[in-house]
Amino acid sequence: MTEHHQDSTILACEDMSCRIAAEPQPLKVLQDINFQVRRRTALGIVGESGAGKSMLIKAIMGIAPSSVSIQGRITLDGHDLLSMNPREWARLMGRKVGIVFQNPMTSLNPYVPIGRQIDEASRLHLGLSRDDARTRAIELLTVVGIPDPKDCYDYYPHHFSGGMKQRIMIAAALSCHPDLLIADEATTALDVTVQKEVLDLLQRIQEERQMSMILVSHNLGVVAGRTDEILVLYGGHVIEFGPTADVFRNPRHRYTEALLSAMPQMDQPAHTRLRTIPGQPPSLAKQLPGCPFAPRCPAAQGACHAFMPEMIASGSSGHRFACHFPLEEIRAQPQEEISEMDLAHGR
Amino acid sequence: MAGDVTGAAGSSAPSTEALLTVDRLSVNFTRSGKVMRAVDGVSFKVAAGETLGLVGESGSGKTTIGRALLRLLPEVNTKWDGSIRYQGSDIGPLSNATMRRMRSRLQMIFQDPLSSFNPRRKVEAIVAEGLVIQGVPKQERDQRVRAALADVGFELSEIAGRRPHQFSGGQCQRIAIARALAVEPELIVCDEPVASLDVSVQAHVINLLQDIREARKLALIFISHDLAVVRNVSDRVAVLYMGKIVEMGSGEQVYDRPAHPYTRTLLEAVPVVDASRKLRPDGQRSVMPSRIKPPSGCAFRTRCARATTKCAETEPSLTPGPHGQLVACHFPHQEEAPGHVARTA
């Protein structure tokens, strides 16, 4: 179990699918999911409600409801998760993965002082003594920027604001030196100013501790400046994946592009008409063959309704997408490349 | 207090006669003996057909202002002061019965439409609710329900008989808009109307509101924490901090040439879809001061990099700033560098 992997991948999903048992046929929540998270990088997962973001995280963490069956392969640090028994799985997750959920109030026990909630994992998984665990918890509270960490150790969750509670959750997630930190809509409930601070904190910790991070969000802006790669989910499928800058600058899938242009921009004048995506998001109950976006896609043709496109590479950067009739590839203009290099150096 | 200048600055819509004039509105809540100032001397005007955006962090008083305008504040432990004049008549002293009739001209849309609907009623009854209160005869009522639903893209015959839970979030919000429109109001207070919607649905609801606003010459007060959404829908924007307006002006003034340090802080925090480079964490911290014992002088000084002793001693009043907007700051930013561009450049 402690065998060291030189492998550059911390997490990989191969042909992973999730189904919920239902009548008359099982509901396909996630289908043929393939992606990798490289060590020391941050991956963003975006998608609208019902796209399968949360189910993907739950499946990886081994906390999916019992009605969900998972096929394919999920490997974490070289361990094949689906072949493990639930206890081993939980133990591995406790040691290697830290997770921060959207609502800190429901993740923290209101009757237990926050320090003890941070201790819990390090005592259980690392076998630290009560005193050592306490010292460690106070250290972590300092790392996440809680003022007077020694006193705060004994405070209860209700003493803290939403942003502070989320910092405490991050401290708890870090308590076992995880290799991978997952933030599942961790800043959605926060004000923009506090959101920025928590995102700054997550990014700083990820870089300093050389961890990998998965940032799940419905907000494209949150993911844009904070991740190395991005995965776009739609109707339970990965429809686009690649380096964040590539995907945002040159989306190849029409859904990604439509989503980007549906967002109001701060540099547009008032009353600018927003682009909308016609139709309804796909329903789990009425799954059709073919591309899940086909019913709403302006470019959809026969093939789109007949079968799901394979992932196709766009250029050599690892950018890939699943579309029969993709948007054109924009070749980077030499001028643009210069200005970007300037930016990188001027940083 | 700058009660009288507030309507004039940065008004791009014709402001010959204000539809709504709010003068020194204050709202105090009392909780276990302690008094909290939720809204503190806020003054503004809204002209017919104009959209005023209210932005600020949670606890800045946005929602309280919206509710005060429709006299929907809680009855207990609440004290409000100041004047709210609607087309010249003060709505403060109105009896509850008169206020009810007044609401045919002032309507509200809430963040979570599902919880603002009675789950057991059918959509057509929900949309007709205001008309029943107004005593509109049945035949005209049906006609107006049909027209209001058509305005938000529904055919009455297609959805009649269905109940709220049979609709998605975006559809519910459209029904909520139809309910507000049915009484043919002149002003709608929209409290975070798109906050709970997905991006693609949000775009649809925003476009819809814009179409209706134009077609019906509606005035809107648009409350949101999402600065990009507010920029899109508003003619003028008021930035709130700790129950006070700290900056107010046209969208261009407030977003492109923000003068108040708080406005800049807010704008800089907005996550922008610009992946051309990775952001650098800057370690800025924002701790909201206590609402019960606010700081002396300017309430923002505890978070402000420009604060001096003057800021602790005297509270800045809302006065015309360097670029024509109103700003409550002793040391407003003069430079033109817009917050969101400054961050990406």
Image (tube, grey):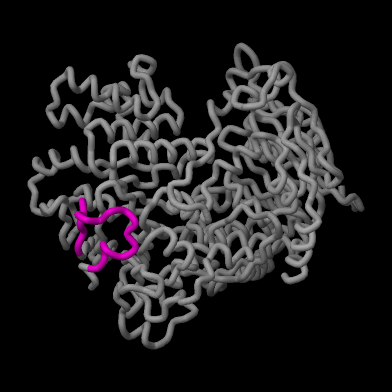
Residue B311 on the magenta span: no
Start-end of magenta stretch: B5-23
Q: Position of residue B223 (x, y in %)?
A: 36, 51
Q: Is residue A91 above or below residue B261?
A: above
Q: Residue at x 24, y 63 (%)?
A: B43
**Rendered-image quadrant of the C terminus of chain B:** bottom right
Q: Viewed as shown, does residue A323 lie left or right of A77?
A: left
Residue placed most toward the observer, B6 or B161: B6
Instruction: Specify the quadrant of the image occupied by residue A300.
Output: top right
Q: Would you identify the image quadrant in which residue B132 lies?
A: top left
| Residue B123 in sight | yes
> In the image, residue B133 lies at what x, y percent?
15, 31
Q: Position of residue B99 (x, y in %)?
A: 13, 44
Left or right: B237 in relation to B69: right
What residue is shown at x 68% (from left), y 59% (from top)?
A: A174
- Number of numbered discs on residues: 0
Residue B135 screen position, x and y as percent: 12, 28
Using the rendered view, name the quadrant where residue B84 is placed.
Answer: bottom left
Q: Is residue B129 above or below residue A127?
A: above
Quadrant of the drawing holding the N terminus of chain B: bottom left
Q: Nearer the viewer, residue A34 or A260?
A: A260
Residue at 71% across, 21% down:
A304
Q: Is residue A342 left or right of residue B122?
A: right
Q: Nearer the viewer, residue B179 or B52?
A: B52
Give the prevailing secondary structure in the magenta stretch: loop
Is residue B149 toward the left or the right of residue A45 in the image?
left
